[in-house]
């Protein structure tokens, strides 16, 4: 029954939203160039399927590269800052400054330094994804149980043994949470990069670039279709991180063991 409820409530809500959509369009006679129907959006997506698939691949490549770079660099920097208070005090304020600097200001600088196209898009994605990984992972390294940490000291464990057997397991849920947040932001960062620094490849650009193209051509159903495509790309990233979360924590972490007991 619980499994059926998980599907029935979202399905019912979706049907209700579609009914409201069609009803509002018919009631107020909203033209399709303002609000197309879901059927028109699906028809446009099928008509532009090759362009949309190519756009997803371009945007997905930039999102994946920026995401992986942010996760790798963020994890290593968090590890260093967790074991050196001076380094944390030195670097963390500047990490916050970068996070608070709007991407629309950083993007032209990246274009100036890296050129138009994929490198600048990866840099924009990296900047958007970097802070959640660093903030969560640093907190995770510092949240290891104090009693266990003292036990490692009493047993004269090496620094590497403490990192491997205590700090990394303690930080893993925080790190994966940061990855999940970064996974939701990665497609947004890549699409923002497409808007500000995107180019065409064989006549096709990324999702953000094609959004501008469809809008300028007044292909409004296709414009909505790019939004659906971007949403699907975001689900793909979040689903991948959620799967990794399940694989790494399901056998030992309380969040999974407790749910199985209930």
Image: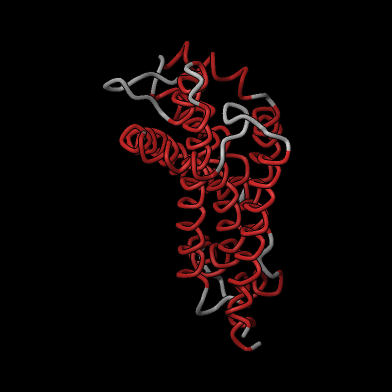
Q: Is residue 219 left or right of residue 91?
A: left
At which x and y percent is residue 60? 40, 39
Q: Is residue 193 left or right of residue 259?
A: left
Q: Is residue 230 above or below residue 212?
A: below
**Residue at image coords 55%, 58%:** 176
**Residue at image coords 54%, 62%:** 168
For the C terminus, which image quadrant? bottom right
At which x and y percent is residue 111? 47, 15
**Residue at image coords 34%, 38%:** 49
At which x and y percent is residue 212? 50, 20
In the foreground, 135 or 243: 243
Which residue, as the protein is rendered here, is positioned at the far top?
112
Q: Is residue 232 left or right of residue 106?
A: left
**What is the number of callouts on the image?**
0
Tell me which corner region of the image, top left, top right, bottom left or bottom right, holds residue 86: top right
At which x and y percent is residue 93? 71, 32
Q: Is residue 106 above or below residue 181?
A: above
For the N terminus, which image quadrant? bottom right
Tell me which corner region of the image, top left, top right, bottom left or bottom right, holds residue 115: top left
Q: Is residue 240 above or below residue 6?
A: above
**Residue at image coords 60%, 57%:** 177
In the foreground, 244 or 96: 244
Colour mode of the rendering: secondary structure
In the foreground, 51 or 251: 51
In the foreground, 140 or 86: 140
């Amino acid at each position: 029954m619980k499994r059926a409820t998980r599907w029935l409530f979202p399905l019912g809500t979706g049907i209700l939203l579609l009914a409201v959509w069609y009803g509002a369009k018919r009631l107020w006679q909203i033209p399709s160039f303002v609000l197309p129907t879901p059927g028109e959006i699906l028809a446009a997506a099928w008509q532009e399927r090759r362009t949309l698939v190519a756009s997803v691949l371009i945007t997905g490549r930039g999102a994946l590269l920026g995401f992986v770079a942010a996760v790798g660099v963020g994890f290593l920097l968090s590890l260093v800052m967790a074991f050196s208070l001076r380094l944390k005090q030195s670097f963390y304020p500047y990490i916050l400054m970068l996070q608070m600097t709007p991407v629309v200001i950083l993007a032209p600088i990246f274009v100036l330094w890296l050129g138009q196209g994929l490198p600048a898009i990866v840099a924009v994605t990296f900047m958007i994804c970097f802070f959640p990984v660093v903030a969560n992972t640093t907190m995770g390294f510092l949240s290891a149980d104090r009693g266990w940490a003292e036990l490692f000291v009493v047993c004269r464990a090496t620094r590497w043994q403490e990192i491997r057997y205590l700090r990394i397991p303690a930080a893993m849920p925080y790190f994966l949470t940061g990855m999940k947040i970064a996974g939701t932001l990665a497609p947004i960062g890549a699409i923002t990069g497409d808007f500000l620094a995107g180019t065409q490849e064989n006549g096709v650009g990324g999702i953000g670039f094609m959004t501008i193209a469809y809008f300028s051509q007044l292909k409004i159903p296709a414009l909505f279709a790019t939004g659906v495509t971007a949403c699907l790309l975001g689900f793909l990233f979040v689903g991948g991180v959620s799967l990794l979360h399940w694989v790494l924590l399901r056998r030992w972490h309380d969040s999974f063991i407790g749910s199985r007991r209930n």
